Image (cartoon, helix red, strand yellow):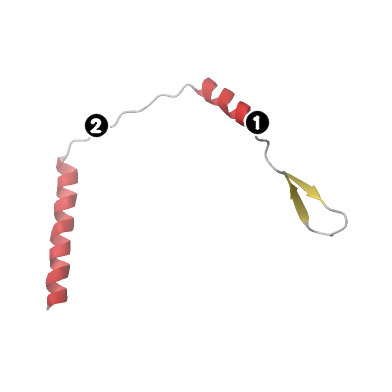
Amino acid sequence: MEREIGSKIEDIERAHVIRDARETNVETSIIKVDTSDWQIFLSQMEAEHPPPQKIEDSSRSGQCVVRR
């Protein structure tokens, strides 16, 4: 009996949260990003932190060694 009442209270609370979220008028804005700046930033990051390279190790057949 207590469990049923508890779950009903949770359902009512959940319904109130959903209703409040629907009633709240939230404005969404789209942020425009200049892609050329982003490309410059990415190329600088790659220059400073090159991705790890996979190198085949001939001593262990079929295994790769990641060298940083």
Depicted 30 relative to depicted 54: above or below: above
In the rendered structure, which amino acid carries the disc numbered 1? Glu
- Where residue 62 appears, as percent x and y from the top left, is 80, 59
In the rendered structure, which amino acid carries the disc numbered 2? Glu
**Relative horizontal placement of residue 8, taking residue 43 as reference (left or right):** left
Point out the residue furthest to the bottom here.
Answer: 1
Point out the residue furthest to the right here.
Answer: 59
- Where residue 48 appears, as percent x and y from the top left, is 65, 31
Depicted 17 relative to depicted 27: above or below: below
- For the point 56% across and 26% down, the residue is 41
**Relative horizontal placement of residue 4, taking residue 58 as reference (left or right):** left
* Element type at mark 2: loop
Q: Quadrant of the C terminus?
A: top right
**Relative horizontal placement of residue 48, taking residue 13 as reference (left or right):** right
* Element type at mark 1: helix
Q: Which residue is mark 2?
A: 27
- Where residue 35 appears, as percent x and y from the top left, is 51, 23
Classify 10 Å Cα crowding around label 2: few (below 14), some (14-19), many (20 and above): few
- For the point 58% across and 29% down, the residue is 42
Q: Which residue is mark 1?
A: 48
